[in-house]
């Protein structure tokens, strides 16, 4: 407390052990009959500040609250705080942050600073992902090669390409370092939960001990990202004992009640072919049934066996939601990452749940819809508002079932995070939004209020030199198509000082440009730019969008086949609303169709001379999203009899195609028509693609007719 106040204000307070409440002081008292866990009360009166806390942890949190309220700066003669009373307690007991140090290694000092940052935001569980395919990071005495060999990879895949660099990357923590880290965390009331990911995500271990894999290797610490089929061989008893030995030493280092044993992304291909695994399946009497394969049950066997080993040591397991496939280990806590459905199901089965849904709480995802202004990331779209508005308890749960939701956690995977400053940029300030999800009751949350408080918090980040993203202080623009008026209304909001200026001719706005005062209406093609200009001369990121009206804009449209549920957003109108999509296919500007031929009908309202169809395909070969195989345009005057005016085939894009937006134009002889029927056929995934044999996705943004 003393140090925190000194850091922020320059005032060095004296610390005394004193039974009585004294004036001109911050009085802290522990143990005063609170009913809520970790509750505290802060009372500020003109003479003093008094903190009453249910326990030491609550007292620690109360100090964080005061810390965040202090005015920042050393020049102050005195500090004043408004009088009042605060009663506070956390909504959830589990308030986590996960960091992956396997894909990229971060030194101990960086991890300590992450713990400091967690403490400032009143988080209490640090999920430490210390083993994976790309690097083993924890010293294990019984198996020294895990760190000698498994902690180093000889290169790394160059982002979104087929090439590898030849730079060795690695590192590990010694047992002593980790024990020191545990103490560091404890003094900040944080528990470190280690994860030994098994039986998949173990290639780094197999590189060190190839005898524990199904094929016997040789293996290499992985230079790629994704999911490998090289996993532990449960048919080999020695491999199972290896896992138990590792867990035993990990439990010696980390006193945490929970030990995370992964269980995610574990392909069964090797097990299906492996004589030892097949023998084990026979021995255990495992069989395929309607819902699962014998190999799925083999995975359940591994998880249950590790659970009972860990329980015999007085601890409990956590596993990723894949552990629901097959038979769930009896006392497992489930970490729901593929959305919230796994968490919902587990809670209904009366298992404890920690919510970490990727669409809301993955901090490796982009923070804006303009990836070009952000450092390269794995993908996704998870702006701070999306985090803030997340509700961890699914509404389908009864009050009794809801108790199984222990809390929420953000996950930070580091495939695309190789330096520490970028790591901070990804977690801050989204972590502050997460903190309010973890602490506050839904009815007390208010995004506007939150962002206004964030300005002060950002000053604290500056004080400590923590890098953070500032997108939240940029223009928040909403573009609403108004079909009746045949126009798009742009509403822009911002936080903090400064005014918004905009142009419609593509020029960069200055204070001489139009000042934004209310909605701007767009009903013709233009190049729209807006920016916040602040008194101190600083400007936020430019908001830039092109409006591209065509003969089909704002006209009635119907679809015979609907887009996939996850990518339907506002429905068919998206295809004629005059708004183009950006690189991110989850933005709401794209409709996504899975294996369906798109069959759209547009009513131009009257006979109109037309000669071209134009649309964009969002291409992401790795995510199974391809271009169109065939495009047809048919026309009609009565919406009954149609005739084809063009029919065009396209070649499939190559397997190594980079993600991009592909414009597609189909010209035909000018003709008059009222109704236009557009038919777009998808490809099947080609040979050599991981999804070979399945249909491809098609994502389109607008069906523009000229
Ligand atoms: C899925 S989340 C994974 C990780 C990746 C992450 C990237 C989970 C249990 N598995 O191995 O790093 O996606 O976002």
Image (cartoon, rainbow, N blue to C red):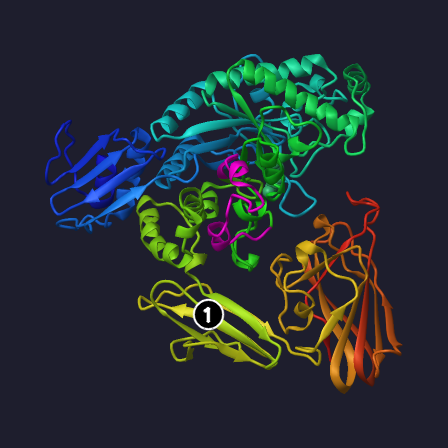
Residue at 41% x, 77% y is 517
User: In the image, residue 110 lies at what x, y percent?
Assistant: 42, 35
Position of 139 relative to 530 (above/below): above
Region in magenta? 380-408
| Residue 700 position by quadrant | bottom right
Category of crowding for the residue at label 1, using alpha-carbon neighbours closer than 10 angstroms: few (below 14), some (14–19), many (at least 20): some
- Return the x and y of residue 288 as percentages of the image width and height: 81, 28
Camera sees residue 166: no
In which of the image's four quarters is ligand 1 placed? top right
Residue 536 at x, y = what percent?
Answer: 31, 66
Question: Circle 1 — which element?
Answer: strand
Q: Is residue 54 left or right of residue 251?
A: left
* Residue 390, magenta (yes or no): yes
Residue at horizontal 29 percent and vertical 31 percent from the top: 54
Q: Is residue 341 magenta?
A: no
Q: Is residue 697 above or below residue 310?
A: below
Location of the N terminus (image quadrant) = top left
- Residue 694 lies, with reference to residue 17, above or below; the image says below
Tell me the quadrant of the picture where the C terminus can be found: bottom right
* Residue 339 vs residue 263, the one in the foreground: 339
Residue designated by label 1: 492
Q: Is residue 260 shown to the viewer in this render?
A: yes
């Amino acid at each position: 407390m003393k140090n925190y106040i000194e850091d922020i204000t320059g005032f060095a307070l004296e610390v005394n052990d004193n039974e009585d409440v004294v004036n001109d002081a911050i009085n802290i008292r522990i143990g005063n009959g609170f009913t809520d866990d970790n509750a505290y009360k802060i009372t500020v009166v003109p003479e003093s500040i008094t903190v009453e806390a249910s326990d030491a942890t609550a007292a620690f949190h109360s100090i964080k609250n005061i810390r965040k309220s202090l005015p920042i700066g050393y020049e102050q003669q005195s500090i004043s705080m408004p009088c009042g009373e605060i009663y506070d307690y956390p909504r959830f007991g589990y308030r986590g942050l996960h960091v992956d140090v396997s894909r990229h290694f971060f030194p101990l000092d960086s991890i300590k600073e992450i713990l400091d940052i967690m403490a400032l935001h009143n988080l209490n569980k640090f999920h430490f992902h210390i083993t994976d395919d790309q690097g083993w990071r924890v010293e294990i005495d019984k198996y020294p090669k895990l760190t000698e060999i498994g902690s180093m990879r000889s290169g790394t895949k160059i982002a979104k390409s087929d090439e590898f660099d030849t730079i060795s990357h690695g590192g590990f923590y010694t047992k002593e370092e980790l024990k020191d880290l545990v103490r560091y965390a404890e003094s900040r009331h944080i528990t470190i939960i280690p994860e030994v990911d098994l039986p998949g995500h173990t290639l780094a271990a197999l590189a060190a001990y190839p005898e524990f894999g199904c094929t016997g290797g040789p293996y290499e610490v992985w230079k790629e990202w994704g999911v490998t089929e090289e996993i532990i061989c449960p048919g080999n008893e020695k491999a199972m004992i290896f896992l138990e030995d590792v867990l035993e030493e990990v439990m010696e280092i980390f006193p945490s009640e929970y030990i995370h044993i992964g269980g995610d992304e574990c392909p069964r291909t090797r097990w299906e072919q492996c004589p030892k695994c097949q023998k084990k399946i026979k021995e255990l009497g495992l069989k395929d049934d309607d819902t699962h394969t014998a190999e799925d049950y083999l995975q359940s066997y591994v998880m249950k066996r590790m659970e009972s080993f860990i329980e015999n040591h007085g601890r409990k397991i956590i596993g990723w939601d894949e552990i629901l496939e097959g038979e769930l280990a009896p006392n497992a806590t489930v970490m729901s990452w593929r959305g919230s459905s796994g968490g919902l199901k587990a809670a209904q089965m009366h298992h404890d749940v920690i919510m970490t849904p990727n669409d809301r709480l993955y901090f490796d995802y982009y923070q804006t819809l303009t990836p070009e202004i952000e450092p390269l990331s794995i993908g996704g779209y998870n702006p701070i508002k999306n985090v803030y508005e997340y509700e961890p308890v699914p509404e389908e749960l009864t009050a009794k079932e809801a108790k199984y939701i222990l809390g929420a956690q953000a996950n930070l995977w580091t495939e695309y995070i190789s330096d520490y400053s970028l790591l901070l940029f990804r977690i801050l300030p989204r972590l502050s939004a997460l903190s309010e999800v973890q602490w506050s009751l839904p009815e007390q949350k208010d995004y506007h209020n939150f962002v206004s408080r964030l300005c002060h918090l950002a000053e604290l980040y500056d004080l400590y030199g923590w890098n953070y993203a500032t997108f939240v202080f940029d223009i928040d623009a909403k573009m609403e198509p108004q079909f009746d008026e045949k126009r798009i209304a742009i509403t822009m909001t911002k936080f903090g000082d400064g005014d918004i200026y905009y142009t419609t001719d593509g020029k960069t706005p200055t204070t001489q440009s139009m000042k934004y005062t209310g909605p701007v209406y767009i009903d013709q093609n233009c190049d729209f730019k807006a920016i916040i200009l602040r008194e101190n001369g600083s400007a936020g990121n430019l908001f830039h969008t092109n409006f591209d009206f065509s003969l089909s804009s704002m006209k009635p449209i119907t679809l015979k086949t609907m887009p996939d549920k996850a990518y339907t957003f506002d429905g068919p109108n998206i295809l004629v609303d005059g708004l183009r999509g950006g690189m991110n296919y989850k933005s709401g500007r794209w409709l996504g169709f899975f294996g369906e031929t798109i069959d759209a009908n547009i009513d131009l309202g009257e006979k109109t001379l037309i000669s071209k169809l134009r649309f964009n395909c969002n291409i992401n070969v790795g995510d199974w999203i391809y271009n169109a195989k065939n495009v047809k345009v048919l026309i009609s005057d009565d919406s009954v009899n149609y005739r084809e005016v063009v029919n065009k085939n396209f070649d499939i894009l190559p397997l190594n195609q980079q993600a991009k937006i592909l414009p597609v134009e189909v010209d035909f002889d000018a003709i008059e028509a009222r109704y236009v029927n557009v038919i777009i056929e998808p490809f099947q995934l080609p040979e050599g693609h991981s999804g070979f044999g399945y249909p491809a996705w098609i994502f389109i943004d607008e069906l523009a007719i000229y």
